Image (tube, coloured by chain):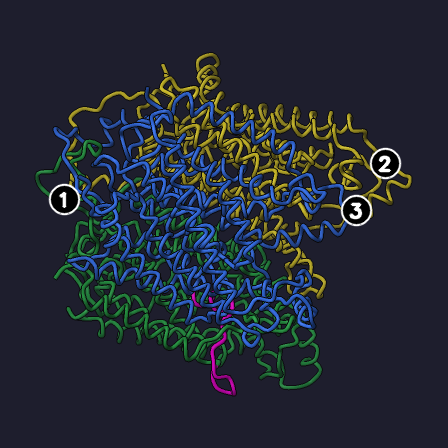
Chain colours: A yellow, B green, C blue
Amino acid sequence: MKGAGRRTVLALLGFQALLIVLSCVLVRYDRSAAADANPSNDDQAIENMKVYSMFQDVHVMIFIGFGFLMTFLRRYGFSSVGFNFLLSAVVIQWAIICNGVSELGNGQSTISVTLQSLMSADITAAACLISMGAVLGKTSPLQLLIMGIIETAVYAANEFVAHHKLQVTDAGDSIFVHVFGAYFGLAVSMVLGKPRHSDLEGSSYNSDLFAMIGSVFLWICWPSFNSGGLVGSAQQRGVINTYLSLAASCVTAFAISALSNPKRKFDMVHIQNATLAGGVAIGTAANLMVQPFGAMLVGSLAGILSVVGFQYIQPKLLAKINLHDTCGVHNLHGMPGVFAGIVGALMAFLANKDNYGYNLYVHFPARVPADGPEVADAQQADRDLQPNVGRSAVEQALFQLLALGITLVVAVVTGAVTGFILKGKYWEEFEENYDDEPYWEMHEDTHQNSKYSKVAPLPLPQELPLRHGIELS
Amino acid sequence: MKGAGRRTVLALLGFQALLIVLSCVLVRYDRSAAADANPSNDDQAIENMKVYSMFQDVHVMIFIGFGFLMTFLRRYGFSSVGFNFLLSAVVIQWAIICNGVSELGNGQSTISVTLQSLMSADITAAACLISMGAVLGKTSPLQLLIMGIIETAVYAANEFVAHHKLQVTDAGDSIFVHVFGAYFGLAVSMVLGKPRHSDLEGSSYNSDLFAMIGSVFLWICWPSFNSGGLVGSAQQRGVINTYLSLAASCVTAFAISALSNPKRKFDMVHIQNATLAGGVAIGTAANLMVQPFGAMLVGSLAGILSVVGFQYIQPKLLAKINLHDTCGVHNLHGMPGVFAGIVGALMAFLANKDNYGYNLYVHFPARVPADGPEVADAQQADRDLQPNVGRSAVEQALFQLLALGITLVVAVVTGAVTGFILKGKYWEEFEENYDDEPYWEMHEDTHQNSKYSKVAPLPLPQELPLRHGIELS
Amino acid sequence: MKGAGRRTVLALLGFQALLIVLSCVLVRYDRSAAADANPSNDDQAIENMKVYSMFQDVHVMIFIGFGFLMTFLRRYGFSSVGFNFLLSAVVIQWAIICNGVSELGNGQSTISVTLQSLMSADITAAACLISMGAVLGKTSPLQLLIMGIIETAVYAANEFVAHHKLQVTDAGDSIFVHVFGAYFGLAVSMVLGKPRHSDLEGSSYNSDLFAMIGSVFLWICWPSFNSGGLVGSAQQRGVINTYLSLAASCVTAFAISALSNPKRKFDMVHIQNATLAGGVAIGTAANLMVQPFGAMLVGSLAGILSVVGFQYIQPKLLAKINLHDTCGVHNLHGMPGVFAGIVGALMAFLANKDNYGYNLYVHFPARVPADGPEVADAQQADRDLQPNVGRSAVEQALFQLLALGITLVVAVVTGAVTGFILKGKYWEEFEENYDDEPYWEMHEDTHQNSKYSKVAPLPLPQELPLRHGIELS
């Protein structure tokens, strides 16, 4: 049978119904979004809405950025932007529940929704879309849906443990979103196996331009992604760091792209992706005192690392361990994400009262001592701070690395399990890879003979080299 | 004669001159935008500018969203995005005057312009662009211009009556913009008659991708459209409701799109349009206490309703009553808008002091009694509230339905009159439908033989099936 | 040798390294972006971040707006959006240093970075991108890089002199960015000489639609460009003026486009460009009391001027003085920028205490007298105002014209010098103009024979008319 299929329809309608029922039972407006509130709740609403334009930037990244970035595949544009749209629409509803479950208990019987819940839901979707990038063109919408539902739940659990239990900082979610999403998706791809060779795994002139829409919007909005959860001077610092890191990674990505090409030409694969590596790499430390030159240095190295990944590491992973990665998420999200985690640990190690003042405790709450005058001083910087375990700089740095390591392991293991679940024809997958035709009604196939298209049918199809220069045997 | 023509040029220059003269006589900066102000006017300016990012989102919807959504027609892309641009540029200047006329009198001799005036002007343009969608590809720029000028004036009158006289709520303007714009445009289309069959009424692979740019930006920015006029907790609630309703309608639109296709494939027509129906359907009640699950339920139903409209109702309307609707605005704006009006009436019926507190009176000012202690309490919630007629919940619900009904009747009648005005060759319309060629200098027609396009002319043009699966006899 | 080349790679890596070293020595977070700050610095951070959404709009203009506007060249899309990306990424880092150098000395040893520094950096990039438009398709990335590095330094010097020494107003940087960037680029183009005829200097149907993405985003975000540096009522006024001027220029650009065409057809070249002339033309006076009708009048005239430039003046400049201008920046930025400067001078002449109150001194600080009660009154409007030279309205207007004249001379002279520097094969320029092929790895060239493209190779390439209707001999 062709098409998205009966099970996909049932799964979409069934899961949407389940989301409504669960929300009916579990989810309510936060008091700051409720009408029956006292005036102070309006003040909280106004406070929440201050990051609305940053939230919308993140929204643009999820639906335009990721969606169009993936349209580089010349005959998979409908699926790229369409399944990105569908998967995200499912995940953002589900993520509000998964991310909010930890609120339940202790006398609270419902999950409270604010603008910040929506931003977190969008950020969760980013993790799922990164994973989707690894398996793009090789999975059915139903497989993506199942993957997204599982991944959202695991994401929420890992983020809760790392953020709340390990008490690590990760302002731009480089560990929780980029590392997690990339290695989860790579593990799924690994288990699903190397796809058959397809002459459609490549771009066209127009598909590469459509992809640039996604790429440039991701690049533009990234400062909001890394700073949307920050406040005050830290938020401005997050914007400055991300802006500079991205600019630097753009420059080095162009340079290394030409350097790695025998004819010293630029490669659209690198320009669409590696220019963004600076946003990933500065993510964990976006709120920290890296200074402008530090951000530029991190971005420069990330741009180089990412192009090297596309050009040299990705073909080796495919050849050696059969790891196929359609969008090269390992090069844009995986390695730069690990780099971000290491930069974060380094900055945690360098953080002290001299360069942070009492904001040290805002960024690293676990460094607040259990008692003593420091507690009161820290609470002057942020009155929500509580007495804590009083970690040293070294301890905080090690906890940062621990969170990175745990995230890596959780992503690979749960991704592999998800991969095994997704195997088999049950999920309405088709043999044709990188092809919209099995999933989309193609009105335009019928107009090739119109007086305007002025094209004649070609006698014989021929084999094509692959876009990433990787030969699939 | 070919081209936009002499009358179009004269009409554009003449109307632009008229707009400048009228503005010279009637329009001035509001005090909050004037330099010769006391410091408190600066405070009001800062207050006004708080919704600037929402205003810009609406601006993106009007010029990118509507403009690119209509580029799905494969040979009408220049006209879609170009005439959308031109019509909106005329309407937004004209709307500032039409929407502001009601301010005149009572000692005020000029219309005051604020950021909010610009937002209202953009929203008025949305109504005209929805109408344009019904007649897209079948009308000349001059016809669109005349239609827009008439429609803007009628829009302003209807909105004034419904909003100020009937005192109904319609936060996202689903009644005033979507219902009004859709049925106005459908009435125009009905009177203009069924177009000749054209093999250009269809999309191409690239034109469908361009249309997705418009569609996704509309989807992303819609929360700002529905919440730009709200404040405090109501604004945050409007964002949450719209976000969730849109997500749910995206999911059900995909599901019902595949379900309604014999091969269970998705259809770009539905994905570009029905995914947005949740934004329309929650519009009237966007500020009300529907709770997250309510918003998701409304969106889910709207997505289903919209696909059913495209797939089953639109072909029937064409076959039975010769109603041709190029973009299917009946399915995205018409029916979901009526649904929104009904949801608004239902929520008005359910609204009481228990679930709204004194904000009940903010959202439904007509429920403020004529006198008594309730008046003073209401003024604590919003000091602009005045003693009013003290409607009951049932009365408010009936007034909501009355406004919906009046808007429907006004739209159909004035749209039909406009249609009669637009009939005839006087308006420089061309026989060719869905074709840029009569209106645009086509530089690119000459490059089909370049070494890059690598295409050969086709010997014979052939007939094409239509995109919407509708056969025009 | 083909490709971007060895020198380009070295220049990119070398200059990026230099930027990091210079930033390490010279650039630090402003106190409002530093962690070791007292709470009042957080307040300043919050104040700075109030224009974040305007900053992001400017960011969209630089990277999406300019980038996609230039993709109109049908075979230069990768280079247009790609080199726009690369050049801007270099310039924004370099501009932070150049624009900040004037802060050094007087006890300050480092340049302080705020959100406003990033906005200024983006605006500096706009000047370089305008210059790029004049030489688009005729210069190598290395030439663009050298040009951008020189131009950024000259821009900073000219802006410093005009703004701080001549004390002129130019809210939307029409003089400093548009006039400067256009005439600098035209001087470079003049010196580089008329390019060989190329049949690729034209658009295709899709490339014109991609260009509309850039054009419409520029149009939408322009109010933020003109108002991002303003506060209070002036900021709201800047938005209103720019919005109305743009709308009016859109209408007249369409009208004159059809009027100037023998078949009365619209021309995409005009629609993509002249519709934006209103944003340029109102720039200098965006914060002044032009009133809505004044803004509409300025925009109307700018739209006419710009189309006349494209249609009549540009071909003459090419024929008479061999001045080739790929994007027609003289018509969109050059002449409308000069017009803006004249409008600014006129408004300065008309400004007095009656129509501005004490805000007169905010907009024209040089009009504050050296002493007397006016000084204290002015400081009530803005406490940063200092006793000044007490210019009259006529003097201020003449200074406005002086700044315009100086900018013109500086732009032409330094642009010509830059042009001489850029001559010769040293800069890895190629013979092929308007062609991505020399600079980009073209994966898609290999897929022309796929079963999907359904195209057959053309036997013989043929000569093409040029897009702008200009015949190059």
Residue C311, magenta (yes or no) = no
Which residue is drawn at the image coordinates 38% and 52% (left, top)? Answer: C333
> Which residue occupies the foreground of this view, C274 or A125?
C274
Q: Which region is colored magenta? A: B104-122
Q: Is residue A317 visible?
A: yes
Residue at coordinates 22% horizontally, 51% vertically from top-left?
B201
Q: Secondary structure at mark 3?
A: helix
- The circle drawn on residue A369 is 2
Quarter holding the N terminus of chain B is bottom left
The amino acid on which the numbered mark 3 sits, given as a three-letter code, is Ala
Q: Are marks 3 and 1 in contact (CB under 8 Å)?
A: no
Which numbered disc, 3 or 1, marks the residue that appears first in the sequence? Answer: 3
Residue C334: where, in percent of width, then height? 37, 52
Residue A120 position within the rendered picture, expressed as x and y whole percent measured from the top left: 60, 44
Viewer-proximal residue, C13 or C284? Answer: C284
Residue bearing the label numbered 3: A381
Q: Chain of mark 3?
A: A
Q: Could you give the CA–CA distance between mark 3 and mark 1, rounded to whole angstroms?
A: 70 Å
Chain assignment, label 2: A
Q: Is residue A70 above or below residue C246?
A: above
